[in-house]
Image (cartoon, coloured by chain):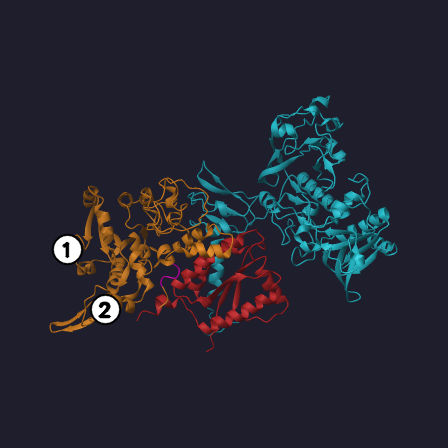
Amino acid sequence: MNFEPKIIAFLCNWCTYTAADAAGVARMEQPANVDVIRVMCTGRIEPMFVLKAFAEGADGVIVSGCHPPGDCHYTNGNFKTFRRMPLLERILSQFGIEDGRFHWGWISGAEAPKWAELARTFTEQVRGLGPLNWKDQLASKED
Amino acid sequence: MMDAGRHPNITLLTNSEVAAVSGYVGNFKVTVKKKPRYIKEELCVGCLQCIDACTYKEAKFADEFQMGLGKRKPVYLPFPQATPQVVLIDPQRCIQLKTGKCKKTCAAACDRNAIDFEQKEETVEVDVGAIIISTGFQPFDATRIPAYGYGRYPNVYTGLEVERLTSASGPTAGEVILRDGTRPKSVGIVHCVGSRDEKTNRYCSRVCCMYSLKLAHMVKDHTGAQVYNFYIDMRTPGKSYEEFYDKLLSEDVRFIRGRVAEVTDWAVKPEEEGKLVIRVEDTLIGVVRRIPVDMVILSTGLEPQADAASVASMFGISRSADGFFAEAHPKLRPVETNTDGVYLAGCSQGPRDVPDTVAHAGAAASMTIALLNRGQVTISPTVASVDEKLCSACKTCLSICPYQAIVFNADKNIAVVNDALCKGCGTCAAACPAAAITARHFSDEQIVAQIEGLLREPKTAEGARP
Amino acid sequence: MAEKLKLALYWAASCGGCEIAIVELREKILVVDQVADILFWPVAIDAKYKDVEAMPDGHIDVCLFNGAIRTSENEHLAHLLRKKSKVLVAFGSCANEGCMPGLANLYDRQSIFDYVYLESPSTDNPNKVVPQTQNKMPEGEIQIPKFYQTVKTLAQTVDVDYHIPGCPPQAPQIWAVIEAIVQGKLPAKGSVVGANEKTVCDECKHDRKEKAVKQFYRTYEIIPSSTQCLFDQGLICAGPATRGGCGALCTKVDVPCRGCYGPPPHVVDQGAALMSACASVVDADTEEEAARIVGGIADPIGTFYRFGLAASLLHRRKI
């Protein structure tokens, strides 16, 4: 059975969501594995969302927004993002979730090809890591 | 300007700067610091007798309006058309203000007793409903391109300096003469100084081609010199602009297409002795040329003011990548900012010439009139709100709002979001450790529901995804 | 004379502190004795498991269950006491969120046994004896409970009616709950009782200002000011993300709150909430500076999930 990774992407409305939309309109090749949740700004993204996504069965998570320092539609929402994400990365690592399953970065509204590229390469990267199936952690690991 | 100064509904606060801004659309409070002129504005009639009577018999100090080419006294009128038509005293130059030991001949000469050496800085608070920022630009500092020799070679000038030379009210009453008093017989005008340049400013400053053509025409008219313009592209949009360029082509102004590499006084041939040599690749004929001239004029570009960052921060607006204040939308909203009630007019938003500035400013004025006449503002519902029962006053949210839309209510001991200032970014909701802040329409519950929904196992064959 | 309340108390994987908390009622425990019959309390009275098994279902009015579910015995008693009790209360941080036993979820059974029985510096076990669930002895076969891979909370094991948080719950709060039980004034099922709706900050008298943290400190690294908010000073105080009701005992003596009363209402994951608050107020305007400052937090998972790992969204480290 081929493993199809389930990837949740939290994208900011003004930049990466716009890029993803443009990539779709331009029919750039992207896998269907990435599901997008739109927020107005990456500053809205709290660590709890990413943890919840993994807990509910995501194999990979993406957070992407406007380039700092100047692109954020809300001036500096992305500053909060780059303060939170490194700490979240360490926590995920301490939970035993491999580095390659979480990606955070910046893609502007004009960078649709970059989004399509990320969707493709991240899907393959997560595919290589295999399913995470977090719900199994409590259930089937008890022998 | 005089009309504005006289209008009963207009209060001019000159020689002042904005110190602080608080509030939100419809309810701004602006704190203005009025710096002392040492002149009682309401008494001075602009007769200028104080200037004649000044203890300095000769004007000695660089006159800013004349770009340092002329001189003024410590007491002076900033420029001939200054509004209000009131002099001011420069505290760095006036002997009385620096040492307290002057005969104060100016005060004696003033028959209105308008001079007041004791005048102090005043703080004025104004309540306004809207703000228009028209703080203009600063000219590019030509010393940043050492290869052009500005500041080293006395006969290298900037365009603004030559504007003053050609002006009848300028330091030379319109005579275009060099520092040694002689007339130039050849003049090179260098376009794109500090513009279209990867090392300084990448953008085009929009006005320089036209003003370079104007200076070419004026200089030729005043001196009969041979004039060369060194350009990359000739940018002459606008009514009659291209036709003006054509006229210059027929006036024997020489146009050489190439970005000037260097201005140097090292002569290689006899005809270059004592002149400034402009080295440039003439790209239309593919030859590197050396053109000796008596005078070089650098067409310097327009930059945002040096304090643009702090002004932007004070008014709660953002800046574009080029440093000018950011408009709300590059095509459709040229005079609004992303902060409701704060508008932009003129070069503060980006380089433009006089007709475009008039149009831009008119747009800003009309948006302001519309706003104030409406009396109401419609705001987006996707704002944050604090649950009083849950907020425990940890104050985590206060410093992270980009719009300072969260204030602390000390009576109730809770944080409160100002709906008019909140733009709905949600960063406070994400930071609140007590989940006391809800980002309406992007709440925790809504986003968690999306996560759960997207990851719910489909009831179809295992692994199958549409 | 009203019928006495039938009360049971049990300790699963715990330190015994919650039992001490009951004793902290001091003279009021005599009142408890007046209004209640304690049917089962292993630390204090001589009732056995078979006594509980013999009771009719729902016989116990209120059971205060403390401790996390670490072994098959804990699990068995959780199910048994659920069956035999009308109202089952998760008492204390272990039962509610896993507390310290929950931190073992950073490891698995094998690595725990290896360390404890074989590798630790103070272990003297030359024959490498490791616990087995069954062992044949001359007298017969003996069994000991199974040590599960994962520590669970009480609510992850059985239905829980009320939650009393705290490590341990503070005596005045315990008393308030007992009074409510006796007077029949408990709120809706599923509620947290014996604690506040607001966070520890609401009870803390330190002076809080707008935050801008340039460096995080561990508690031994600085002597904090007694008046300024500990979080403002760079100590990781869990107060803002912790339910109040304890009286802010720790911050009162300038020790940062550790989060033992669990998350405030509506917070889904206490560690995530605290982590977000800490990082959000880092005083950094570049990615490098931000990474450097949060890099100064020594053990993120142990700091933010100190009490709530078992109850958190991910529950445990991946096996």
Secondary element type, mark 2: helix
Query: Quick check: B123 left or right of A123?
Result: right
Mark 2 neighbour density, 10 Å: few (under 14) some (14–19) many (20 or more): some
Tell me, yes or no, if residue C1 can be seen here.
no
Tell me, yes or no, if residue B443 can be seen here.
yes
Q: Tell me which residue sits at (76%, 52%) in the image.
A: B296
Residue B283: which quarter of the image? bottom right
Secondary element type, mark 1: loop
Residue A96: which quarter of the image? bottom left
Dot 1 amino acid type: Asp
- Residue identified by numbered label 2: C118
> Residue B59 or C216: which is nearer the viewer?
B59
Query: Quick check: B60 left or right of A117?
Result: right
Q: Tell me which residue sits at (74%, 39%) in the image.
A: B70
Indicate the position of residue C317 as horizontal and vertical percent values.
Answer: 36, 64
Q: Which chain is red?
A: A
Prevailing secondary structure of the magenta residues? loop
Question: Chain C's shade in the image?
Answer: orange
- Residue identified by numbered label 1: C46
Mark 1 neighbour density, 10 Å: few (under 14) some (14–19) many (20 or more): few
Closer mark to the observer between disc 2 and disc 1: 2
Is C149 placed above or below C185 here?
below
Write down the region rendered in magenta.
C312-316
Q: Chain of mark 2?
A: C
